[in-house]
Image: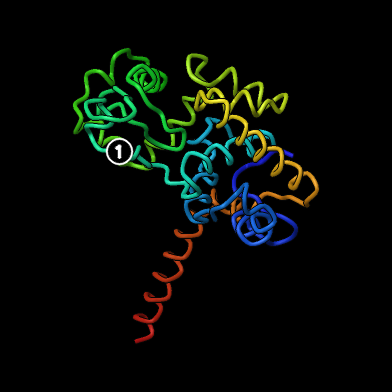
Amino acid sequence: MQIKGNIWVDGFNSFGVWFNEVFRPQHPQLFPSKIDTDNYEYVFDNLRELTGKDSINLNEFVGLFCSFYQETGGSFDVCQVEIGDRAYIEGTAGGTKLAYAWKERGRGLTGMTWANNFNIFFEYFTGKKGVFDALSEEQVDAFFSKKENCIKTVQAWINDPRLGATAYAKMRDEGAFWQYGKKVNGADAYASTFDLRCKTLLRALQNAKLRNSSVLWLKKYVPYMVAATALGVGGYLVWQNYKE
């Protein structure tokens, strides 16, 4: 099945409702948090901005969903920013030393971090090198305060071979979830949790009846529906005035 956005599971349950009310209660330790269904639907109903494609396969859907779940704790906040004060992030305080600049802190559904990765992100869309380096902290914050910009960090991550494209392709084609989780975070423990989550969710979806949300079929017709409604209202008002 090719997934084109939000899916419905076993009849008329939106995936978000199914996940929160049916699937998650069966796996409370593996998936301790409910998801924000509005944020989830925004992410997957904007699939082209998210992935650069109009459809994805089930491995991709599961892998993306679980990576976003793991990175955001279920909030699916596309503009999420890494938690931590400036001293901690820049490695000037005690404790774990992260030691990267404040404007390089993790952002978005992939937790994109480090100047090199952000430079690749901007180059992926603009074709220009060093764009991120030339931006001030304020400009970076302003850019990544907009959903339409934040969501595209995923597209660059999964399509650019300098980022996560190679691991993503193996996940897509072979179900190599552990390898993708390792690429996203770098830690074996993270990859193992991610792998188990993906395989558990994948099994459940393979045994369910899935279909793309019917809302998706209406999206391209919305402008015409709005225009038709406006014309109808306008015509009615003209007729009422004429009668008077």
* Image quadrant where one finds the N terminus: top right
In the displayed orientation, state which residue is furthest to the right: 207
- Is residue 7 or residue 220 the one in the foreground? 7
Quarter of the image where one finds residue 83: top left
Residue for point 41% across, 37% down: 108
Determine the residue positioned at 52% across, 40% down: 70
* Residue 133: x %, y % from top left: 25, 18
> Which of these two is toward me, 139 or 95?
95
Q: Residues within 10 Å of mark 1 (few under 14, many from 20)?
A: few
- The residue shown at (47%, 51%) is 39
Name the spot of residue 161 as percent of width and height, x first.
Answer: 52, 15
Residue 30 % position (x, y): 62, 47
Q: Nearer the viewer, residue 201 or 1?
A: 201
The amino acid type of the residue labelled 1 equals: Gly
- Mark 1 lies on a secondary structure that is loop
- Please state if 214 lies on the left or on the right of 232 as rendered: right
